[in-house]
Amino acid sequence: MATISNDIFESLLKQIEGYSPAIESVEVGRVLEVGDGIARVSGLDNLRFSELVRFSNGTPGIAFNLEKDNVGIIILGEYDTIQEGDAIRPLGRIASIPVGQGLVGRVVDALGNPVDGKGPINASEFYNVERIAPGVIERKNVNRPVQTGLISIDSMIPIGRGQRELIIGDRQTGKTAIAIDTILNQKGKDMYCIYVAIGKRRGEVARLVALLEEYGAMEYTTVVVASASDSAAMNYIAPYSGCAIGEWFMENGKDALVVYDDLSKHAWAYRQVSLLMRRPPGREAYPGDVFYLHSRLLERAAQLSEARGGGSLTALPVIETLLGDVSAYVPTNVISITDGQIYLEPELFYAGTRPAINVGISVSRVGGDAQTKAMKKVAGGLRLDLAQFRALAAFAQFGSDLDKSTQQQLDRGLRLTELLKQPQYQPISLSDQVALLYAGTKGYLDTIPVDRVKEWQTSFLRTFNTQYAELATSIAEKKTLDETQEATLKEAISSFVASWS
């Protein structure tokens, strides 16, 4: 017994003698002051910008202001229990988010934590929330379309893969509706979608997610939520997180579409955080770098070259205007960064023209490069026809007698306007759009009463997709409208118009 005890004693003694403790140096800061979602801390001299930190109560934060004698931290969560003097530790990594296929079909917060109750995210990679945009040499020209399913956009304001197209308009004019319709139309088109909800009510986001699930769009969509009840810090980083998720798809040779809804609230969140950090205010109380806030986000959208895998990231930022004022600070900033804008007008919306797109000032700077040959052929003169119609309609209000050609232009314009009206959540396929626009621009609808154009459209498309299914498939696959296809289409429309009553 004594021998066993001696052996154990000697063994322990040898272990103690051979033990050399590893010295680990950990920087620990102390909270100087806390309140309104921000904290000032001392003792973190080696902290980097955007580095993650953790307070003693477990709440994360991000380094935002690096000053001479203290660091400004934006708190990503509850700050009520954080007190002066509490310890704070750096986590040694820049703010990052999980990325990959595991996020498809999920609803996450701005840090990538799941909020849909479906368990943890299956992701092996992390991307920094803030990343440098691809360089000039790494990009190529935008030349493939993003089919929105909205006939007025696909025909006159085409969006290309890798483009940044701004959706701008007053409150309640259908901005989100356009973004959601675009997401719904990507089913089966090998496009991954990310919807970033910034400053929206949780109930509104829940309804939106339920809608996407109903139409089967969550199979290829990720929703990033920073609701109105979340802190300004979460609202500030949410779009960058959504962009990082989309970049993973782009860098892996896939196509992704990210919707920022909306960047006005993003700018408000940034202004709030900046003012609390005592950064000097500029125009409209925004800090001086508010332009850089959005430019470094939207510049990350790109069509990569073949050498980089040929993937793309398309950005659809949303901006809310006040009483149609597009000359306000944030709208003008974002207009100058983007490749065009879709302007929604309240007057058109209330008059029943939905989507309420003002074709006159809406523009796509990519233009015909992002259109299929078939669409380019039938939609070439549509914008001009509508512009002439609006000018004549304004003039005709003051006159009674109009010559035959003017009256004909007015009648055709009324029918084209009716044709471009489209209910929500009912995207139209490319072949159907081509057929309808051909009928409208070539004058086949001139004999149809204006109030029955939508009725005619429904009946025609039913016939077109059954009796002429081969032609519809041919246009959809080839994306062209050659002489043979055109002759068959002409025959289909004229025979239907003749028999329809």
Image: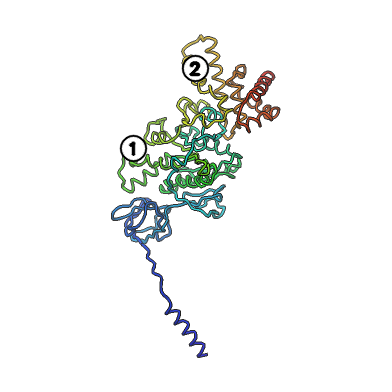
Q: Is residue 499 above or below residue 210?
A: above
Badge 1 amino acid: Glu
For marks 1 and 2, the one nearer the N-term is: 1
Crowding near pointer 2: few (<14 within 10 Å), some, many (20+)?
Answer: some
Label 2 element class: helix
Q: Nearer the viewer, residue 370 or 104?
A: 370
* Figure quadrant of residue 57: bottom left
* Figure quadrant of residue 280: top left
Q: Is residue 41 above or below residue 354?
A: below
Residue at the extreme right: 467
Residue wearing tag 1: 284
Residue at the extreme bottom: 2
Q: Residue at x 55, y 26 (%)?
A: 376
Q: Is residue 375 visible?
A: yes
x and y percent of residue 484 in the render? 66, 24
Residue wearing tag 2: 393
Badge 2 amino acid: Ala
x and y percent of residue 380 in the render? 54, 23
